[in-house]
Amino acid sequence: MPASAPEPTEADTECARQPIGVVLDIAGSGSQIALDLERLNECMDHPDPSIALAGQVGSQIKIRTRDGWLLASVRNQKQDRRGAGNSVVANIDFMGEGKEEKLTGKIHGFRRGVTRYPIPGAMVFPATTEDLRQIYASDGRSAIQIGTVYPTSDIRAGMYIDAMLGKHFALLGSTGTGKSTSAALILHRICEAAPQGHILMIDPHGEYSAAFKNYGMIFDVSNLQMPYWLMNFEEHCEVLLNSSGNDLQSDRDILGKCLLAARKKNRLAESMGKITVDSPIPYLLSDLSNLIQDEMGKLDKATNTAPYMRIKTKIEEIKADPRYQFMFSGMLVGDTMGDFLAKIFRMPGSGKPISIIDVSGVPSDITSTVVAVLSRLVFDFAIWGRNEKTSPILLVCEEAHRYVPNEKNADGNSVGTVLSRIAKEGRKYGISLGLITQRPSDLAEGVLSQCGTIISMRLNNDRDQAFVKAAMPEGARGFLDSIPALRNRECIVCGEGVSIPIRVSFDNLEESKRPASEDPSFTELWNTGGGEEDMVHRTVQRWRAQGT
């Protein structure tokens, strides 16, 4: 618990009641004020940190209106050339308004937005910690607490779970800002608030296994056992076809015809009547291979057999490669679809609501396809289950810019299409999308703007900062200017998940709940020796085994 602040003296109380400036002009979303430099210096020694920072960039001030107070955030400052050097001009962004208790002068009933604007000449006062406590107080909706509101030491920062998940969220931040730990903190808080939830996280680096080993299920190539026949036609093409141009179209035609015939051989297909090439019906890889061989046998001698041989060879390669066994094993032919979905969607969750899908051991050429299949299964499950009272599912995607890239980096993979569709339509079906990335400017256009809540940590790149500013609401501009100046494990939160934009210092997370993402200490590791030969030998063994 933070140490309790010393009792304010009469002089301190008087300082908080005295104006620090005056309104110069008014505009729709923000205005310009003049601040008295002498008064700002007086406030700097105040024991209340909110008053001590009064008037500074990123701080909050309040303006008296006819029946209450208007709260605003200071966006920038510059010296007033017209004054005698003791005046500062600042631009402010309005945050909301509250009524005034007549006896105490305190703010209550704070609401986002402005209904009554002040007039030029209205007095500007410092906002106290008590004022901020009213502003940031939860309005009774279900919320998770993630940290402390800056600049206070004891006001808790909460995010409304339903609003945050109902309209998607994005966590952004450059490498080394504490992004992984903050993501783990948010997910742990959600799991604590909803122990019967359904959360699926795509973890490309295997960082989060350590953070959730006691609170969820960890799936990697050793135990994922994802049946290959769950792939739709498009995903089959990505895995089995290497050709391009005109060859690609002829290969697709052959694969589509043979894949449908292979699916139809299953007794399940016979009982269903009509099926398509996309229907998730089990089939044998050997059946697909034999059907391609049969089609090739029907050809005239003069016709090209190369497309058939290409597909057949690729199927044989995949069957023989031990790295693909987690997906293309002969053991995965049975109809295990219901069990597989129940397992990865945590239905039932048994108090462990999160599935971490560690794709770090998946061969790089099919990683995107595996993520595409998992994402599409979430979407299709929600669509076909919309008549049931299905539970919503949260899909969290780490390193999102790899899977939903912008046009410049697009590789035509189906995962981008699936995730973009979830971003646009998912909330209608009870799917929430959480995107975590260090390069927001590399994300597909429009995906970030679909995220109703944006949690931005420090971003060092100018393009990334500009991209995030474009996606955020107007009133948060003052906060956004401080993105490059945020410390590690600090963030700006704005959008649906909070009443008004806030700057937050994240809570510390217990050691057992942290991801394995800490940077190595070069000096420490390079000053200790011993055991290197054994370490190299063990590494080579694992390297050769390729996770098998």
Image: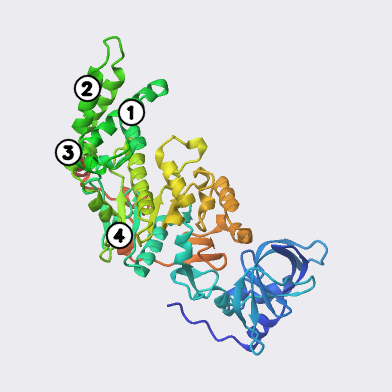
User: Does label 2 or label 1 sit earlier along the sequence?
Assistant: 1
Earlier in the chain: of badge 3 and badge 2, it is: 2
Which callout, 4 or 2, points to the residue nearer the camera? 2
Q: Position of residue 493 (x, y in %)?
A: 52, 62
Residue hosting label 1: 241
Contact (Cβ within 8 Å) of mark 3 with mark 2: no
- Report the disc number at residue 294: 2
| For marks 3 and 4 on the same chain, the one whose residue lies earlier in the sequence | 4
* Amino acid residing under circle 1: Leu
* Distance between mark 4 and mark 2 Cα atoms: 49 Å
In the rendering, at what x and y percent does residue 85 appear?
Answer: 78, 66
Q: Amino acid at mark 4?
A: Phe
Tell me, what colour scheme is on the image? rainbow
Q: Residue furthest left?
A: 331
Task: Please give the residue where the numbered disc 4 appears in the rendered image.
Answer: 212
At mark 2, the secondary structure is: helix
**Mark 3 — residue?**
330
Which comes sooner in the sequence, label 3 or label 1?
1
